[in-house]
Image (cartoon, rainbow, N blue to C red):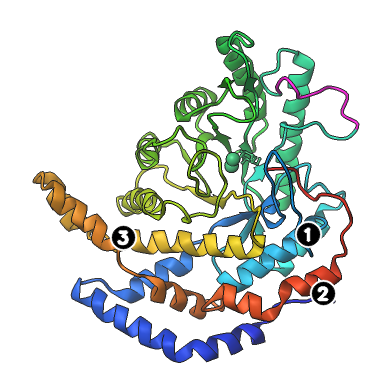
Amino acid sequence: MTYRITPDIVADHNARHATATADDYGALGRTLARRHIDIETIVGKVMAFGVAVPSWGVGTGGTRFARFPGTGEPRNVFDKIEDCGTIYALTRATPAISPHFPWDKVSDLRALREAAAAENLTFDAVNSNTFQDQAGQTLSYKFGSLSHTDKAVRSLAIEHNLECIQTGKELGSKALTVWIADGSNFAGQSNLTKAMDRYLEAMAQVYAGLPADWQVFLEHKLYEPAFYSTVISDWGSSFAAALELGPKAKCLVDLGHHAPNVNIEQIVARLIRFKKLAGFHFNDSKYGDDDLDAGSVEPFRLFLVFNELVDAANRKADGFTPAYMIDQSHNVTDPVESLMQSAIELQRAYAQALLVDRAALTAAQDSNDALGAHLEIKQAFTTDVSPVLAMARQRSGGAVSPIECYRASCYRSHKTKERPASGVASAGIV
Ligand code: AFD
Ligand code: MN
Ligand code: MN
């Protein structure tokens, strides 16, 4: 029997906070009522919000320079599921796992399904990996995968993606996320047009393997590991590829995969408008694909992204069914804590976006009241919605203060004893 944070532990924690939780909730409820906002509606929506945790996120990530593993890290996919279950039990915001193959490969998929079900988790989009060679692989992805100049390498990458779909089907997933590292490091190294041609031809074969109710999410990334050109470098390339592949192909927005200072919320608005928004890999960054915790650097930007999402949901935008996933790499924190904090920050941005008075905003926009419109947005963003988040967690069986409860439980030291270091890294550098 492995250590678990039981409902009793959570209930005790919540009981200690009960008076403060109720007080703060009452005070915010009165503030919002003056703005004609029903706090109960906001809490209900926050409780219904869910974001998937990436299976690779519960291990300590690394940089190109080093990886400093923590103690009690997950040794295999079952340990990862256990940590994801802990994150869900405390936050109630993360009901799904986004698995990554072959990192999470096991022979017995039923065992995987059962392990997830035991933690009340489902499987979200399946991620393929053709950015590193696996043990025993004779052909190499060193110079690319789906866009490789060698047809045999492309076929290997296609096969892997088709296998991911089969695995995903057995896990109950409904989408495949494809991120390729393909690109070039030298001007002239790659024919930019032919590389895209080869990618599209290969992806068409992956697309043909999608079940009727599946989608494929194309994840673009500007640079790294290729530093001169990347085949699916930006949302334009991703959008054009998705358009050509067909309606099941959509564009996944990883917040760190853009040029500096790009207006990501506008990209989100565009993708929604043209029915091509697949969803997100949430994280935050200062410079590039930093993979820092969501909302830790630019919470206003995160809020503005959610502002577009709420706007689209309110007007019931056609084809709007975004998948929410976190994609972070933790070098200096306990990944469980970081993922909980990120899930909370996503809920916060969502709750704040729900507070925008849409009618007042529209009126200000339509009458060209620039500052008035901005103030509508700012008022929502500067409202401290923490009491809403705490109440949503309490009502759904989570902890009012997940990180405090987690630390008090000594979960990590229990896992350190239960999971002796195997010396094998559970995930690559992501
Ligand atoms: C890499 C990429 C990308 C992707 C992840 C998992 O930058 O964010 O989602 O690997 O495949 O870190
Ligand atoms: Mn990503
Ligand atoms: Mn990334």
- Seen at 55% across and 40% down, the residue is 289
Mark 1 vs ligand 1: CB below 8 Å? no
The circle drawn on residue 2 is 2
- Residue 268 percent across, percent down from the top left: 39, 40
- Seen at 57% across and 20% down, the residue is 229
Indicate whether 36 appears above or below 182.
below
Q: How far apart are marks 1 and 2 (CA)?
A: 13 Å
In the rendered structure, does residue 356 fall within the stretch colored magenta? no
The circle drawn on residue 273 is none
Which residues fall within the magenta stretch? 136-144
Q: Main secondary structure of the magenta part?
A: loop
Q: Distance between the residues labelled 3 and 1?
A: 36 Å
Tell me the residue that label 1 is attached to.
Answer: 74
Tell me the residue that label 3 is attached to.
Answer: 381
Mark 3 vs ligand 2: CB below 8 Å? no
Instruction: Classify residue 59 by image quadrant.
Output: bottom right
Give the residue at the far front of this rendering: 65
Q: Which amino acid does label 2 sit on?
A: Thr
Name the mark nearer the viewer: 3 or 2.
3
Q: How crowded is mark 2: few (under 14 residues within 10 Å), some or many (20 or more)?
A: few
Q: Are marks 3 and 2 in contact (CB under 8 Å)?
A: no
In the rendered structure, does residue 141 fall within the stretch colored magenta? yes
**Residue toward you, 174 or 217:** 217
- Seen at 38% across and 40% down, the residue is 272
- Residue 106 percent across, percent down from the top left: 84, 49
Q: How crowded is mark 3: few (under 14 residues within 10 Å), some or many (20 or more)?
A: many
Q: Which amino acid does label 1 sit on?
A: Pro
- Seen at 76% across and 55% down, the residue is 69
**Residue toward you, 369 or 39:** 369
